[in-house]
């Protein structure tokens, strides 16, 4: 029956609205798949962290090598030519990447045990760890709605901060270096890798897989970027709807060049021991080596490792493109420090690193930034982009890099950087670097009683030979005060600190360092007296002597002329060295047995 006033041809209102809706969406029905964008405008973020890499290992930075994906990333994004890490060995640098603060401000129990309370001078090196309060990128971004993942090398564990992880049934296994490869040892490596997943989730990460606790270890000490890339691609695929944060850490380019090429001949050696197979997610190794040769390079040289890690990056970029999330994903590529100057605070081959960022939606292509930036700047950048309100107790010492994204320069950007490594600190401006080496009271005592053979170890900034004295090829490495003009002397070989013409410059640089040290809040030499800090000038004799020693890696040679001048005889015959080594190994074995017994007792 017709209602009053209604025509029999009048369409019911609800149907009319439905047809209008169909007409509205019809033009888009065959426009192809829509890009996923459920991130609320926030970008996905991938931090691709490499180990031990100089600018010379990337063609985009002038290196004589084969890195097509990094070169393309630089062409399509922003290259940073004055990027620095705050410390130049793995652990403290990685701490800063994950927290946005200096390692010298770690409040982990591990660091407190190593250096004491705030009343003492800090000695940041391999003695820091991520803390129980979860003040790290993985946790804070997760709480803000990101899915956060960790893949690859970690190197920040601590039995003091997480003792429960070393007690229960599925606890960490101390695998001896002379373990025999085989199913049993592989099972132990696999257990430790699963242990690392739980550890990282306890720190606040949503997801973790294919994790190396630290550097590759014998008997499975082969690099395998395919193993980490597989996990990275899995994480990206699972979280393509975003937003996600991925902390992807390679074990390359750690170790000697030849170890990279040797690793390529062992495709099934991974961080969980020997596996039966591995997904083909990268260019087949033989094909990559063939390409390197065709490009005119020696496939058995350093280029093999550099091209190999570049190929891993290529797989990541392809996956982003395939999923349609390329435009809104910020990818950062950077190493944890340089190669030649590890454990120093030099710029060249040490704290100054190559860094590239790519984010098509926000960063214009082909930009080059020459501002002073640092790894502590990354966390605050991620927090700003992720619209994070960090806890008030979370100490961040960097500043967001977003003002640099458009024009590569920013008003009132910082004028200098602060660096730290063991007993050394540095202040770096665009033109100058000032380094202060100040030992603690205990270190001074050790230096004064050291034999000639042990003097370089005692005077290295981190108390170690090997990597601890890589910077000793610089004439000023052991000087308590060092000043270098970075434009005229980029390799920092001429120390101007004692040049009478640089008195004013020294005052200016020391003033900047004083300010930064006050912010850190710990004593340091005469800058901030107190605690175990000491003033310079107490070991002038030892400085003059150590400069005359020949140091190569862990080998220290005392020139005969120096022995004669000082009236000393050979300090250590081969027999004496062997006896001391045997005693050290016996003490180490006793400590390990005692630790193992204590763990067994605690598990009962």
Image (cartoon, rainbow, N blue to C red):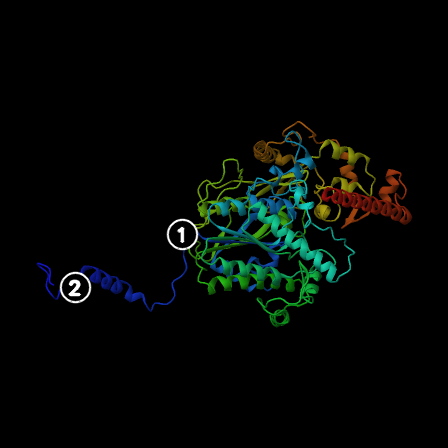
Q: Which residue is drawn at 67% across and 55% down?
A: 191
Tell which of 38 and 431 is nearer to you. Answer: 38
Tell me if I can see residue 268 in this picture. Answer: yes
Q: Are marks 2 and 1 in contact (CB under 8 Å)?
A: no
Across and down, in percent, residue 51 comes to: 63, 54
Checking the image for residue 435, the label placed there is: none
Give above or below for 18 relative to 341. below
Give above or below for 275 relative to 508. below
User: SS of the residue at dot 2?
Assistant: loop
Across and down, in percent, residue 242 comes to: 46, 55
Q: Which residue is drawn at 54% across and 47% down?
A: 138
The quarter holding residue 410 reads top left
Across and down, in percent, residue 503 comes to: 62, 33
Which residue sits furthest front?
A: 1
The quarter holding residue 61 reads bottom right
Categorize mark 2 by other alpha carbons within 10 Å: few (<14), some (14-19), many (20+): few
Tell me if I can see residue 409 in this picture. Answer: no
Tell which of 362 and 161 is nearer to you. Answer: 161
Give above or below for 337 relative to 325. above
Nearest-to-viewer mark from 2 and 1:
2
Q: Which residue is labeled 1 in the image?
A: 41
Q: Earlier in the sequence, mark 2 or mark 1?
A: 2
Which residue sits furthest left?
A: 5
> In which quadrant will I find the N terminus?
bottom left
Q: Which residue is labeled 2 in the image?
A: 11
Categorize mark 1 by other alpha carbons within 10 Å: few (<14), some (14-19), many (20+): few
User: SS of the residue at dot 1?
Assistant: loop
Q: Residue at x 62, y 66 (%)?
A: 278
C-alpha gap between disc 2 and disc 1:
41 Å
């Amino acid at each position: 029956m017709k209602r009053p006033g209604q025509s029999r041809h009048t369409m019911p209102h609800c149907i009319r609205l439905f047809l209008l809706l169909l007409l509205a969406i019809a033009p888009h029905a065959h426009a192809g798949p829509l890009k996923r964008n459920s991130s609320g405008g926030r970008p996905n973020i991938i931090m691709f962290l490499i180990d031990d890499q100089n600018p010379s290992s990337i063609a985009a930075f002038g290196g004589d090598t084969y890195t097509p994906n990094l070169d393309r990333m630089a062409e399509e994004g922003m290259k940073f030519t004055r990027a620095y890490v705050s410390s130049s060995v793995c652990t403290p640098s990685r701490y800063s990447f994950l927290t946005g603060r200096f390692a010298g401000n770690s409040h982990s129990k591990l660091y407190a045990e190593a250096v004491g309370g705030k009343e003492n001078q800090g000695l940041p090196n391999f003695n820091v760890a991520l803390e129980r309060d979860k003040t790290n990128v993985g946790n804070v971004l997760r709480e803000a709605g990101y899915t956060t993942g960790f893949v690859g090398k970690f190197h920040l564990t601590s039995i003091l901060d997480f003792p429960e992880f070393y007690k229960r049934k599925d606890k960490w296994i101390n695998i001896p270096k002379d373990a025999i490869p085989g199913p049993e040892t592989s099972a132990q490596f696999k257990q430790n890798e699963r242990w690392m997943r739980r550890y990282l989730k306890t720190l606040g990460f949503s997801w973790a897989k294919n994790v190396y606790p630290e550097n590759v270890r014998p008997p499975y000490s082969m690099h395998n970027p395919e193993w980490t890339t597989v996990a990275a691609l899995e994480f990206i695929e699972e979280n393509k709807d975003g937003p996600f944060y991925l902390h992807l850490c390679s074990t390359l380019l750690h170790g000697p060049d030849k170890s990279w090429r040797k690793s390529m001949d062992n495709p099934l050696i991974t961080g969980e021991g020997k596996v039966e197979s591995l997904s083909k997610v990268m260019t087949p190794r033989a094909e990559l080596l063939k390409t390197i040769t065709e490009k005119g390079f020696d496939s058995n040289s350093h280029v093999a490792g550099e091209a190999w890690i570049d190929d891993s990056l290529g797989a990541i970029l392809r996956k982003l493109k395939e999923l349609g999330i390329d435009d809104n994903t910020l990818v950062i590529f950077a190493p944890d420090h340089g190669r030649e100057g590890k454990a120093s605070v030099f710029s060249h081959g040490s704290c100054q690193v190559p860094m590239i960022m790519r984010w098509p939606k926000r960063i214009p292509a082909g930009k080059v930034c020459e501002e002073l930036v640092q790894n502590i700047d990354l966390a605050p950048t991620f927090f700003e982009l992720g619209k994070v309100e960090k806890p008030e107790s979370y100490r961040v010492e960097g500043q967001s890099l977003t003002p640099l994204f458009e024009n590569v320069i920013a008003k009132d950007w910082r004028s200098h950087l602060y660096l730290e490594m063991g007993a050394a600190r540095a202040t770096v401006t665009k033109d100058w670097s000032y380094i202060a080496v100040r030992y603690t009271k205990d270190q001074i005592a050790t230096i004064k009683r050291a034999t000639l053979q042990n003097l370089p170890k005692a005077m290295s900034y981190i108390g170690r030979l090997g990597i601890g004295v890589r910077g000793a090829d610089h004439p000023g490495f052991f000087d308590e005060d060092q000043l270098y003009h970075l434009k005229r002397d980029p390799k920092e070989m001429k120390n101007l600190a004692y040049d009478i013409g640089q008195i004013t410059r020294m005052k200016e640089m020391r003033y900047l360092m004083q300010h930064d040290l006050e912010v850190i809040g710990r004593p340091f030499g005469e800058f901030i007296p107190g605690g175990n800090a000491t003033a310079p000038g107490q070991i002038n004799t030892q400085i003059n002597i150590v400069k005359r020693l020949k140091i190569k890696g862990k080998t220290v040679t005392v020139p005969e002329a120096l022995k004669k001048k000082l009236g000393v005889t050979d300090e250590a015959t081969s027999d004496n060295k062997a006896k001391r080594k045997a005693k050290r190994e016996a003490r180490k074995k006793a400590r390990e047995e005692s630790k193992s017994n204590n763990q067994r007792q605690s598990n009962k």
